[in-house]
Amino acid sequence: MGAFRRAQPSWLAVLFSLAAIAIMAAVGSFAIKNFRNLQMDAFSTVGSAFIDGLLAPYARSYSHGFDTEPARLAIQHALDKPEHSNTLALLRIWQRDGSILYSSKSGVGIEDHDHDDMQRAFAGEIVVRLEAHPPANPEKGIPYPHFEIYAPIHDPETGNTLVVGELYQEASELLADRTFVERTTWAAILAATF
């Protein structure tokens, strides 16, 4: 009877097992947090480049008193492209006084922006916010989830911030990718741990 007695795990084995599980959970959390940060940085860079390449000519033409119609037509042409028509929800150019210089959609009001984010952009910072769920009073015509990007548009001669470009980009595909990466990471962590 004593030969078939079940061996009790030693406290040291239990401690090492718990430590391994804790370390692997920390590694998984670290990897996912870094992936999310890299994703936001990438959107920040791409959004800023898009704003600078598409909205900046309009803002510069306006600030120097030139005809803005060619720049407006270029923006509209870009928005009409299939690769942008489903993802770009709204483009706006904001002046320092809080008025809209340009908007790709009418009917989206001046009150529909984050004042603090816009002020940070006027100070030279690129601001990216992921809006996964609509607020109580959602903006008209803006799909959820989306990225909201504020980026300064600079005068090429002086380097001063002229205006701030705002871009809303649909984010459901990116969130699906994020979910896939997170599930894969946790599956790999679980497989390696157990």
Image (spheres, helix red, strand yellow):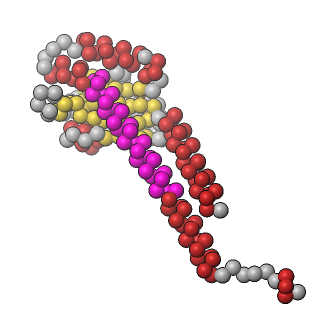
The spot of residue 45 in percent (x, y) is 33, 36
The spot of residue 140 in percent (x, y) is 42, 29
Q: Along the horizontal axis of the image, is 109 left or right of 160?
A: right
Above/below status of 34 relative to 56: below
Residue 112 in sight in this render? no
Name the residue located 15 percent from the left edge and 22 percent from the top edge.
63
The C terminus: image quadrant = bottom right
Which of the 4 image quarters holds residue 7? bottom right
Q: Nearer the viewer, residue 25 or 95?
A: 25
Name the residue located 55 percent from the left edge and 71 percent from the top edge.
19
Judged from this view, the residue extending furthest toward the front is 3
Above/below status of 82 relative to 41: above
Extent of the magenta region: 28-55
Q: Along the horizontal axis of the image, is 163 left or right of 129?
A: left
Q: Nearer the viewer, residue 77 or 146?
A: 77
Residue 132 in sight in this render? yes
**Is residue 9 part of the magenta span, yes or no?**
no
